[in-house]
Image (cartoon, rainbow, N blue to C red):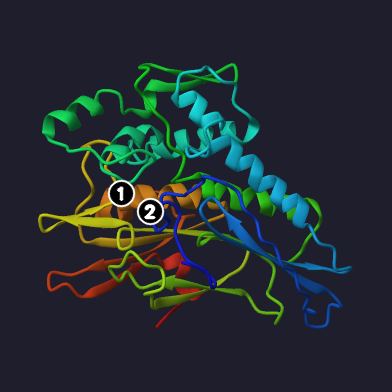
Amino acid sequence: MTPNTPTFYRRSVTRTFLLMLVVLVSSCGRTGPGKGETYMVIKGYTQGTTYMVKYSTPDSTSWKGDIQRILHEVDSSMSTYKEHSIISRINRNEGFTTDRHFREVYHTARRVSEMTDGAFDITVAPLVNAWGFGFTERKKLDSAHIDSMLEFVDYQSVRLKEDRIVKGDERTMIDMNAIAQGYAVDAISRFLEQKETEDYLVEIGGEVRTKGRNPDGQPWRIGIDKPIDSSSARERELQAIVSLKEKAIATSGNYRKFYVEDGVKYSHTINPQTGYPVRHSLLSATVFARECVFADALATAFMVMGRRKSKEFLREHPSIGAYFIYSDDQGNFRIDFTDNIKGLIKNL
């Protein structure tokens, strides 16, 4: 899911994810219809993927430096690939004090974990690493290894006390990769709203939040990828177009980040309750919510839960929308989506 850039957080990126923050920024202007405003475009690289920010301004103001600062702060807080980030120090049990970014993401993660009965769990890091999708090398696993790691994978064993993370087991490790990208989108969006920006689109690695309208005076239009098995973001087709206004969307899928071993496909989405990569018919889940951090975490949770349980969840939370792509018994693509987004979707 992306306007015109490669998709997915940890889902399609290489091992350099969050290793460094290299931002290449360009800006250009385009006048909005009848408003006498310019739309600035800022693009670059962050968190091992691309980002793009478009926003209207009456005086061509560039917020490049401020956007870079926000991205750097989030990276320094939650990058498992930065040795001196807060999360890396916590994972080494150094008792490091958290910052406001980490605390906000932690509280949202805890909320989503409770809402989804543990389908979303930031302590899944040891399992993600062991299966070869994290920040360490893949291990040779058997059921005994999986069971031993499950002993210290439990979001309830981690708590925030006086701005520090307290673990029930020192072997527990935290991974914010399935939520921090959505948070970064929200952080930039909040900055733009503080500057009284009426129209914007913020996109990082395919996670998007919008407000107002695009330079043509229309709702922002976002593409949802067709879930074609590939490790390359270049081999892609669009499944649908979304017209988005005052909402955020995030997508999770198992069709880019995977490997095949002995004829078995292993996807990057790990069920924190079983310890194994998920295997079901749901190929991708796109979540619509007010905040991107919430949509990001729920998209991952839905991929763990599967379509049936996700739909049960959505019936209990009618303010959240979702678009599912799944395979039927014959291997054909099928779609399913909630009624509250029906008017936003154009299927291709």
Q: Earlier in the sequence, mark 1 or mark 2?
A: 1
101 w.r.t. 194: above or below: above
Q: Is residue 104 toward the left or the right of residue 27 in the image?
A: left
231 w.r.t. 184: above or below: below
Q: Is residue 190 toward the left or the right of residue 158 in the image?
A: right
Tell me the distance, in whole angstroms, between the alpha carbons under discs 1 and 2: 20 Å
Give the amino acid at mark 1: Thr
Q: Position of residue 222 (x, y in %)?
A: 53, 72
Tell me the residue at 69%/73% (across/down): 213
Q: Is residue 226 toward the left or the right of residue 70 in the image?
A: left
* Tag shown at residue 314: 2
* Residue 117 seen in render: yes
Q: Position of residue 174 (x, y in %)?
A: 42, 31
Give the amino acid at mark 2: Leu
Q: Residue placed farthest to the right in the image?
A: 59
Mark 1 or 2: in front is 1
**Residue to which mark 1 is pinned:** 269
* Tag shown at residue 171: none
Question: Neighbour class for label 1 at 10 Å: few (<14), some, many (≥20)?
Answer: many
SS for dot 1: loop
Tell me the residue at 83%/82% (across/down): 34
Q: Position of residue 274 (x, y in %)?
A: 20, 37
